[in-house]
Amino acid sequence: MFLDEAIGEGSICSSRYGGSRERVGIDFSSNVTAASDSVHFHAGGLYLVDQRALPSIYKVVKLETCEEVAEAIKNLTVRGAMAIGVAAAYGVVLAALSALKQGSVSVKEESKNAARLLRSQRPTARNLFWALELMEGELDQTPLDGEPLARKLLELADEIALETIETNRRIVDIGQEILPDPAGALTHCNSGPLAGVRYGTALGILIGAHQRGRNIHVFVDETRPLLQGARITAWELERVGSDYTVIVDSAAGEVMREGLVDVVVVGADRIAMNGDTANKIGTYTLAVLSSAHHIPFYVAAPTSTIDAECPEGRQIVVEKRAPEEVRNFDGNLITPASADSYNPAFDITPSSYISGIITEFGILKPPFEESLSSLKTSLS
């Protein structure tokens, strides 16, 4: 897939530590992730593509502690709900290895502490909680400790990574049916290989269409305030040679009015059981514009993004980020220094605006209370 092409061309690998980790009793390396993935665990270190540096620099950072992983999740070194979840799982493994190296510290207790730290970093991303719930479930149930527990945690983190990769691959395949040929597609934020470890969801579908030889042109919302669309989505499309056009967020309505958009497809950070969907701020606006122009609006996400305990969108916690992200652009102040700003990272799109939810098991259709409940029952 696409990320295989990126490694090795101008890549930089950096670590906050000058030397390598002292090896513990076994080689702690992933049997699932590869150096070409946006999240990769190898020889006791977690390697992440630093998404903050794109598109100017392709940089891979090496993390060696759970605390560094928590910081990377918070500061958006790694972003995209699925990549965050996988990174967090390996962050628990790093805590286990740290405890194992110290010898006198309980691997189980340190791993539990790590999970609590990691889950506090991004409140909206369901996949973060999904991955950590699986890790914590193992910690609560197993009698293991020490090196056997550390080995088991690595195996489970690998399972989480594999499920993420395979569900995304199926979403890319299934999502092809929503695209006409030729197609003008609009997407928001970034939901490609970097956000999904290897394939991605919404953007993965659009990249997949190009790789299948279909005639597709992608309109990329720049996605203020951090420009994940202009910086990352455009970079991923450029790398595969897909036709694309970057637009300012406020141009979406005009592009639709001019008849250039046939379909809108976005990712998701959390989906309630009635279909209400949390995604990057600006998604709700796109959904309303799509409805006004009679353009189908699809959400693409694995079932791990669905929150079975959340009945509707108003129960979803929307992360609020620092006002400086709005007041500054590329390091320069763009408002009066004393200006107030409101910076929700996500918004909630009511399910009434959503044409379908593309999952690894097929495309769910309204009424979502019924289709999501049926899916939940079939998976239980």
Image (cartoon, rainbow, N blue to C red):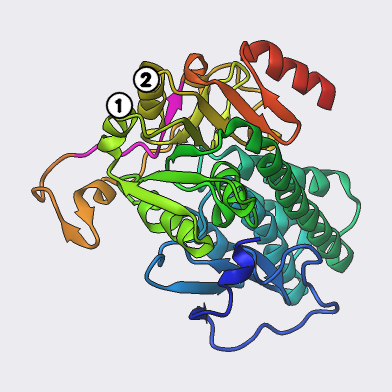
| Residue position marked by numbered label 2 in the rendering | 293
Sequence-wise first label, 2 or 1: 1
| Residue position marked by numbered label 1 in the rendering | 257
Quadrant that contains the C terminus: top right
Place residue 35 in its image quadrant.
bottom right
Q: Is residue 274 above or below residue 115?
A: above
Q: Secondary structure at mark 2?
A: loop
Residue 22 magenta-highlighted:
no
What percent of the width, then of the height, locates residue 280? 43, 38
Q: Secondary structure at mark 1?
A: helix
What percent of the width, then of the height, locates residue 366? 61, 13
Q: Which residues are magenta?
A: 341-349
The foreground one among 127 and 350 is: 350
Q: Is residue 380 visible?
A: no
Q: Residues within 10 Å of mark 2 (few under 14, many from 20)?
A: some
Q: Is residue 325 above or below residue 291?
A: below
The foreground one among 77 and 374 is: 374
Place residue 231 in its image quadrant.
bottom left
- The amino acid pointed to by label 2 is His
Q: Answer left or right for 117 relative to 25.
A: left
Residue 342 magenta-highlighted:
yes
Q: Answer left or right for 248 relative to 141.
A: left
- The amino acid pointed to by label 1 is Arg
What percent of the width, then of the height, locates residue 187? 45, 40
Residue drawn at x 73%, y 55% as measured from the top left = 109
Quadrant that contains the N terminus: bottom right
Task: State yes or no: discs 2 and 1 in contact (Cβ < 8 Å).
Answer: yes
Q: Residues within 10 Å of mark 1 (few under 14, many from 20)?
A: few
